[in-house]
């Protein structure tokens, strides 16, 4: 049974990701209130301890919208380029692109990757040329110094281009993590009319992103869940492995009947009315060490990585 069929029960559409997966991954945690972009206001649910908390219902809705659009693009034969050059996103983007046979760029964005594609292809061809020189014995006929230089050139090219070696045509969509970090990639895609799908935090500018997915772009777990869920749209279209981010309980019920998440499992209380941003509190003792460290990182607590749970709680109070 295809994933699209599994997501539908009794004619009612299911979520592509369960709320508990998002909560456990800390997708709701934004940046400190002093570091935010007003354009992200509509996605903010409340604040807690000077940290913005994003509205996960909007995250799910946006993710589902992006899922359908991306699935359609790939089903029509389009290829996708993952761009994740920040540390937290690199490995995730590489793994998810590999899972579906797509392209990725995780070291650094090479200017002109999209807008000067012919030049980039020439660099890829150079990479293949050096490989062939080593295979056919040309290296054995060259001075050692020249061979060392060629190997250094190869290592540099391979590091930056390995994820797009097979990309002979421009992608039909790109997926980015952190619009601030990937500004140049977004600008090039916008110039060429290539749709941009992006995981965007509260400190980011959503302009230029065609499909905004509000969420924590600093935590590896958060990036994994969001990008992994989005990748399922591609996997469904190409017949690749599907990673299930929906619990059995949520598969059995329509979205409007989903269980309300208990207060102790969330970081927010009753939703504030209208545009009021309500300050919320929670018992820090119910959080795991990894969740406490994520909060400490957001609040810029010094030395948090070496702290124990009790120390983290004291530092966050």
Image (cartoon, rainbow, N blue to C red):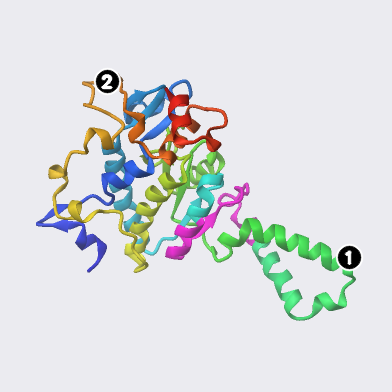
Instruction: Identify which residue, 251 or 97, lies in the foreground.
Output: 251
Instruction: Name the spot of residue 164 as percent of width and height, x first.
Output: 56, 60
Question: Which of the pair 257/11 is nearer the observer?
Answer: 257
Res 206 quadrant in image:
top left
In the picture provided, is 148 more to the left or to the right than 230? Answer: right
Estimate the x, y position of residue 152 in percent, counting from the top left.
77, 60
Question: Relative to 241, is 81 above or below?
Answer: above
Residue 106: within the magenta? yes
Residue 275's label in the rendered image is 2
Quarter containing the N terminus: bottom left
Q: Is residue 261 left or right of residue 311?
A: left
Residue 107 position within the rendered picture, expressed as x and y whole percent measured from the top left:
61, 51
Q: Is residue 196 visible?
A: no
At x 20% / y 62%, what residue is drawn?
A: 5
Rendered position, 136 above or below 85: below
Mark 2–mark 1 Cα distance, whole angstroms, equals 66 Å
Query: Tag 2, which secondary structure?
Result: loop
**Residue at left 49%, top 46%?**
189
The C terminus sits in image quarter: top left
Q: Considering depth in this image, is 19 or 208 the residue closer to the camera? A: 19
- Range covered by the magenta-colored residues: 94-121
Q: Which mark is residue 145?
A: 1
């Amino acid at each position: 049974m295809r994933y699209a069929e599994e997501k539908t029960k009794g004619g009612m559409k299911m979520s592509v990701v369960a709320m508990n997966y998002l909560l456990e991954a800390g997708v709701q945690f934004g940046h400190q209130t002093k570091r935010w972009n007003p354009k992200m206001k509509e996605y903010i649910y409340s604040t807690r301890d000077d940290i913005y908390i994003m509205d996960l219902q909007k995250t799910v809705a946006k993710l589902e919208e992006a899922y359908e659009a991306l699935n359609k693009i790939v089903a029509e034969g389009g290829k996708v380029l993952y761009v994740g050059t920040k540390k937290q996103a690199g490995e995730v983007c590489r793994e998810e692109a590999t899972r579906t046979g797509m392209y990725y760029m995780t070291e650094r964005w090479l200017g002109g990757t999209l807008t000067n594609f012919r030049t980039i292809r020439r660099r890829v061809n150079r990479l293949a040329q050096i490989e062939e020189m080593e295979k056919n014995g040309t290296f054995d006929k060259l001075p050692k110094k020249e061979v060392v230089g060629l190997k250094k050139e190869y290592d540099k090219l391979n590091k930056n281009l390995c994820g797009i070696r097979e990309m002979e045509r421009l992608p039909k969509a790109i997926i980015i993590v952190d619009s601030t970090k990937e500004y140049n990639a977004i600008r090039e895609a916008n110039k060429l009319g290539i749709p941009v799908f992006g995981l965007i935090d509260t400190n980011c500018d959503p302009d230029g992103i065609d499909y905004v997915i509000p969420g924590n772009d600093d935590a590896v777990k958060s990036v994994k869940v969001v990008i992994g869920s989005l990748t399922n749209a591609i996997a469904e279209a190409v017949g690749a492995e599907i990673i299930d981010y929906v619990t059995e309980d949520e598969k059995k019920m329509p979205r409007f009947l989903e269980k309300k998440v208990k207060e102790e499992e969330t970081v927010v209380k009753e939703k504030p009315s209208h545009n009021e941003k309500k300050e919320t509190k929670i018992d820090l003792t119910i959080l795991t060490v990894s969740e406490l460290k994520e909060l400490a990182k957001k609040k810029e607590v010094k030395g948090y990585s070496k702290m124990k749970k009790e120390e983290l709680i004291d530092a966050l109070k």
